[in-house]
Image (tube, coloured by chain):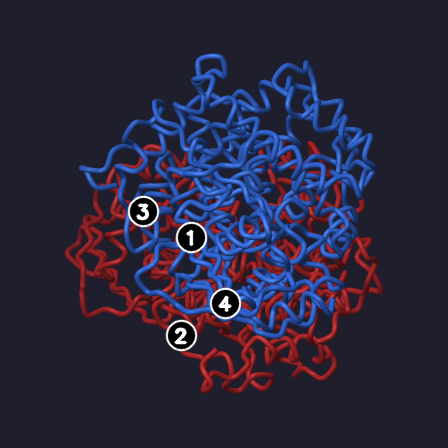
Chain colours: A blue, B red
Amino acid sequence: MDAMTPATTRLLARLVAETRWQDVPAQVRHETVRSFVNWLGCAVGGAPHPGVAAATRAATAYAGRPTTTLLGLGRRSDPMTAALVNGISSHVLDFDDTHDGTLIHPSSPVLSAALALAEDRGVSGEAMLEAFLLGVEVACRVGMAISPAHYEAGWHITGTCGSIGAAAASARLLGLDAERTAWAIGMGASQPVGLRVHFGSMVKSFHPGRAAQNGILAALLAAEGFDAAPDGIEGRRGFAEVLSSSFDVSRITDGLGESWEILRNTYKPFACGLVVHPAIDLCMRLRNEPGFAIDDIEEVRLRVHPLVMDLTGKREPASGLEGKFSIFHAAAVALVDGNGGEAEFSDARVLAPEVVSTRRLVTAQVEPGFRRTQCEVVLRMRDGSERRAETTTPLGSLGNPMSDDALGQKFLGLTASVLGEEKASRLLSRAWDAALQPGLGWLGEA
Amino acid sequence: MDAMTPATTRLLARLVAETRWQDVPAQVRHETVRSFVNWLGCAVGGAPHPGVAAATRAATAYAGRPTTTLLGLGRRSDPMTAALVNGISSHVLDFDDTHDGTLIHPSSPVLSAALALAEDRGVSGEAMLEAFLLGVEVACRVGMAISPAHYEAGWHITGTCGSIGAAAASARLLGLDAERTAWAIGMGASQPVGLRVHFGSMVKSFHPGRAAQNGILAALLAAEGFDAAPDGIEGRRGFAEVLSSSFDVSRITDGLGESWEILRNTYKPFACGLVVHPAIDLCMRLRNEPGFAIDDIEEVRLRVHPLVMDLTGKREPASGLEGKFSIFHAAAVALVDGNGGEAEFSDARVLAPEVVSTRRLVTAQVEPGFRRTQCEVVLRMRDGSERRAETTTPLGSLGNPMSDDALGQKFLGLTASVLGEEKASRLLSRAWDAALQPGLGWLGEA
């Protein structure tokens, strides 16, 4: 370790070992619960995905005693298996949270580990949320210190920093001291998953699931005295040096324990990539204006950030999944249906004649000067008039977060078809009150 | 993927899916068995290490049905847990094999996976060895293509390429077709462990153990239809691009299926780092010369490769472990005891007065022009005469391999104290005959 580099891993470990939920500002605690609610909905909603079924068959082949809920599947397994399966189901719809500034989806790896271990060990809701909050803090701070070089090099940062955050959360739940927490963090860092070559395959959602397992195993080993380098993040041939061409250690140390990264967590209102969200938000706004009628539209003109066309430039999508990669479908279905949830990205809606005909009216112009969250939509109507809307803070962005009510609606939209409306609604209430629950037995309903 | 890059992952997958043990040259098969014998001795001999006990406690907390042997521990667990524990025990003494040209210790990750899965599934010894051979081929060829840049960057290549090799071996044992084998290889590549920052801690031996588990999980997932990118090694943002600054694809493709990397596997005659082996070999040779008497020595002069002093320059070791990092102890104990096994690197021998007094006669001079395997030893005797020996092919190197008998002696030296001499001896016979055994039930004796 360079003499100028602070003992970063130890600083993070001390934060994890010593912070108490009740000492954290109320706003931070509330955001932690919001992240939990959002994640739980995604996990239950993602459970019917074929990738989850395949992974469950594979992982339960050698599973241990079933103490822990496989969310949305109506069954239990051991906590290691649950961490994998819940990690996959919570990320598989690409509908989970995003930390503004790193592109980490922090809840999937960290909460999949924390919840599984917490349920197995029978701890309180508060202890689970405390561990989750601290794991997110560690994952996101390490992520900031190596961003954007690390992600740009091809690492799926949700899996790499996720293993570290999951290890931190698991160490907290096992009550490890700072020294052993540093070992656990170092062992998490020595198991980075995964590679962006797998984007577009099921393996993308495997990454946070495996990261959750990596973190639990790291903490279990450290708890048993299995020792590791104390400087796994910043040390020579450690995580930062090997996995990134740049390392700004101040992003880890500045304000540590005072400012909280969970306050920069964002939640997707729409069931597709973030780059499409500004356009959907604007199309929904225009649709809700007085006098709007879908049949009056002659042309839909979008002005978008360059990434929008890079990532979602598909003009003629043929399936629900392809619809998520089509800015043209997203804008059209938002104008026709007034939403951008899973239902609007079904095969049926992508192929519906009224959506297809509207989609063919959509053009998109790239604006290199735009910010990522910036968009403009102009509707030219048959009578020659124009309806126009623009934004730099679309719904769901840091400057325009989803309300608690909207998060609840999203939760119900994701879970009702899996659990039934009554159970979904009861689960939502329990999730909001998780910090007050003496245990996590109520997850059995999920 | 660059249009010029062959579909490397698919080529490897086809080799794994289509090669049959009986079609492989007899010499290759025999070397596979030699690697198995060497590895099995290391695993049983390493079982009493405290790191193995800690890992076993941690990993069995959530273990499934006990179908698979934890070598040297007199108990069973599920194959996933066995792969971790056997991976750790087989590497923890640093006494396992080394592939000449990559520094990969191929058996620890690959065989820990293959043996566990094979025992669980009840397949023949031949099927297990076939999978092992193919996994080694994949791990070492991928390793060659990214060497030396990958290891020099800080990756523990045994864990990174080990995950890939373990995936390949596991895919073979599960009978996957080439397409699914490519997925498994890609998923192994997306779980690289680990970082060299952990060298000197227990985590070093965790890396091959976790790699073995990663490979099994990758193959189980692929078997269930959990899909992955088909070009996980060579693809854009794949393993080679992200984890190495150089990639020579010809090292994977040239002679694939015709030449076999297991023929470049080497076995350590001595229980310490390879850099020390030439000196031990020469000191033992001089000790065996007619007229040699330890008390006649006035000075021991070594001429060594620079790495020897970098890695093992400790002049006054205080424990058995420190003795492994002291060229001075290694030379002295070889002259006094005539060996370099685990016994010669015990606390007792490092502190024994007759060894300490000989150690203080040893000096070492660095020779920048020497090859890694090169060494010269000069003994200046009290009567003014000199005894001299030199080598570029010390015992255990590719040019001077250990004989089958010597491997057997090493096996017994490692296992007799754990199993008793009779059981150790029976196990050795079974291991040599593994390819002829209808199953692996005989491992229950280990």
- In the displayed structure, A431 sits above or below A413; it is above
- State the residue at coordinates (75%, 34%): A69
Marks 2 and 3: CB-CB under 8 Å? no
- In the displayed structure, B263 sits above or below A227; it is below
Where residue B62 sits, quadrant-wise, is top right
Mark 4 is surrounded, within 10 Å at the Cα level, by few (under 14), some (14 to 19) or many (20 or more) other residues, namely few
Q: CA distance from mark 1 to mark 4?
A: 20 Å
- In the displayed structure, B232 sits above or below B14; it is above
The amino acid type of the residue labelled 1 equals Glu
Q: Position of residue B384 (x, y in %)?
A: 15, 56
Mark 1 vs mark 4: which is more N-terminal?
4
Mark closer to the observer (2, 3)? 2
Where is mark 4, residue-wise?
Answer: A384
Dot 3 falls on a residue whose secondary structure is: helix
Q: Nearer the viewer, residue A278 or B231?
A: A278
Quarter occupied by the N terminus of chain A: top left
The amino acid type of the residue labelled 4 equals Gly
Q: Which mark is residue B358?
A: none
Q: CA distance from mark 3 to mark 1?
A: 80 Å
Circles 1 and 4 on the same subunit: yes
Dot 4 falls on a residue whose secondary structure is: loop
Chain to which mark 3 belongs: B
Where is mark 1, residue-wise?
Answer: A390
Mark closer to the observer (3, 1)? 1
Res B415 visible: no
Where is mark 2, residue-wise?
Answer: B247
Q: Nearer the viewer, residue A441 or A293?
A: A293
Mark closer to the observer (1, 4)? 4
Dot 1 falls on a residue whose secondary structure is: strand
